[in-house]
Image (tube, rainbow, N blue to C red):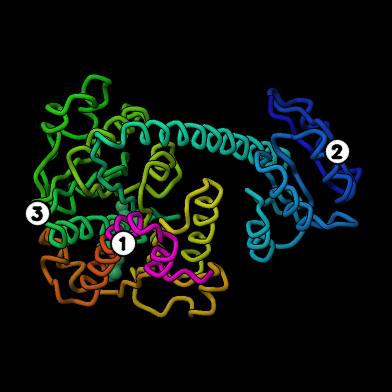
Amino acid sequence: MIRILFADESQHITSNVMKRLEREDGIALCGTARDGEFAFQEAIRLKPDVAVIDASLPGMDGLQTTELLSQHLPYTGIILTSLDSENDAYRQAMYVGAREFLQKPYRGDDLIAAVRRVFEFEQKRQTISQSSSALHDAQAQGAAQTKNGALITVLSGQGGSGKSLIATNLAIDLKRLTNDRVILLDLSLQFGDIGALLNLPSQRTIVDLATNDAVTDMESIEQAIVKGPEGIDVLLAPLSPEQADYVTTSHLRVLIENLRQEYPYLVADTASYLSEVTLDAIEMSDFRVVVFDPSLTGTKNAHLFMQVLNVLNVDPETVTLVMNYRETGPGLDQAGIEGFLHMSPHVVIPYDGVNVSKSQVTSTPITMLAPASPTAAAIKGLGQRLTGEEEAVLEAAKQDTVKKKQRRFFGFAK
Ligand SMILES: Nc1ncnc2c1ncn2[C@@H]1O[C@H](COP(=O)(O)OP(=O)(O)O)[C@@H](O)[C@H]1O
Ligand SMILES: [Mg+2]
C-alpha cells in the first residue's frame, strides 16, 4: 500500500483528490495539510511513502517544506505541484529535492501515475543502497583475492547525445593508452548500436548469456564476445528489441563481476531511459560519464540526470560531465549551462560532421579515422582523465590523501 500525504491550501482540490484516491487500489491517503508547517509535522509523524506538496502553501511555502522534508525524510518521495509554468517551477522543484513536478491544474490520473512512479523509484533506490552495502561487504572480504576491473558507464538523460559514439571511441582510446584488456559492453539492450557502428558480426550476443549457467561460465562468456578494432573485445546487444527482456539485472550483475576478473577496463554504452538495467549499471560503476548536448532541453535533462545520480547516492567525484556538440550551432552559452547545472563540464567535445559521418560510412571509429581531429582528441582526453584519475586514486590510497587528489583531478568547485 502506497501511503500519501497531501498538502494543498485548497479544500476543493483536496476533496477532489480524496475522492479520486478512494477509487484507486494500492494507494491510500494517510494525511492532509493546508499549510507548510502542518505538512512538515504530519510528514514527520506519518512517514508517508509519497508527499504531494503544493508550492504556494501558506506560511512556510511548498519549496521550503520540500527542502526540509527531503533532508529529514529521505525515504519519502516528493511531488511538487504548482500553478507556475513548468519551465520556471521545474528547476526549483528539482533543486529543493522533489522527484516530480506537476503543473496545476492536473488530472487525477496524472497524479496517480506520478505517485506510482515516485514510489517505484524510491523502492528501487532503497534496494540498491541495501544491495550496494552488501556488495561492499562482500568486496571488502574478497578484496585480497579478486581482481577488480573498472566499469565505466556512459550515460545521458536523452537519446542522440553521443553516448554510443563516445563509448566506442573511449574503449579504443583506453586500449591504446593502457595496453590492457578492454571490453565494450552494449547495455542499450533494445536498440544497441555498437554492432552497426563497428560493423561487427552478431551471431552471439548478451542474450546468449541470459541464463544462470552461462553468466557464471567463462567459456560461454568468451564465446559470446566478438573481436573489435584495435584489439578491444565487444559484447553486443540482442539482435531484436524483444530479446532484451531475457537479460535480467541479476544476470548482468554476475556477468559484470565475472568480466571484472578478466578485464581491467569495462566500458558500457547504455540506453537513454532509466531502465532497471541502466540503474544497476549506474550502481555497479566505478566511473560514470554523463553526456549531454548543450541545447536547452539537453542541458535541462542533464541537470535532471545529475539529480537522479544524487538521489542514488552516487559519489559526485566518480562522475565526469561531458558536453558534446552533436550539432552545429552555439547551443546555450556558458552562463546558461552553469545556471542549470551549477557546474561546468569536465570535457567538451566539438562538432565534426564530416569525420563523424565518414566514420559511420566506413564503420571506422573517428579515433582511428582522424585521430588528430579535435573531436577524436577530446574523447582521448576523456580517456586520459579517467586513467589518470585511477592511478591517482591508487596512489593516493597508499598515501592516504585520496580526497585532495581526486578533487584536483576532477576540478570540483567545492
Ligand atoms: N561531436 C559530434 N559531431 C558530429 N556528430 C555527432 C557528434 N556526436 C554525436 N554525433 C552524431 O549524433 C548522432 C547521435 O549520436 P549517438 O552516439 O548515436 O548518440 P546516443 O548513443 O546517445 O543516442 C549520431 O548520428 C552521431 O554520429
Ligand atoms: Mg546509442
The quarter of the picture where residue 17 lies is top right
Number of numbered discs: 3
Location of residue 95 in the rendering, given as x and y in whole percent from the top left corner: 64, 60
At label 3, counting other C-alpha atoms closer than 10 Å, the crowd grade (few under 14, some 14-19, many 20 or more) is some
Secondary structure state at the residue bearing disc 1? helix
Secondary structure state at the residue bearing disc 3? helix
The residue at which mark 3 appears reads as: 229
Judge whether residue 363 is colored magenta: no
Residue bounds of the magenta highlight: 390-414
- What whole-number distance in Å separates the C-alpha atoms at marks 2 and 1? 52 Å
* First-in-chain label (3 vs 1): 3
At label 2, counting other C-alpha atoms closer than 10 Å, the crowd grade (few under 14, some 14-19, many 20 or more) is many
Q: Give above or below for 388 relative to 234.
A: below
Going by the picture, which residue comes out furthest to the top? 213
Residue at x 31% of width, y 32% of height: 142
The residue at which mark 2 appears reads as: 32
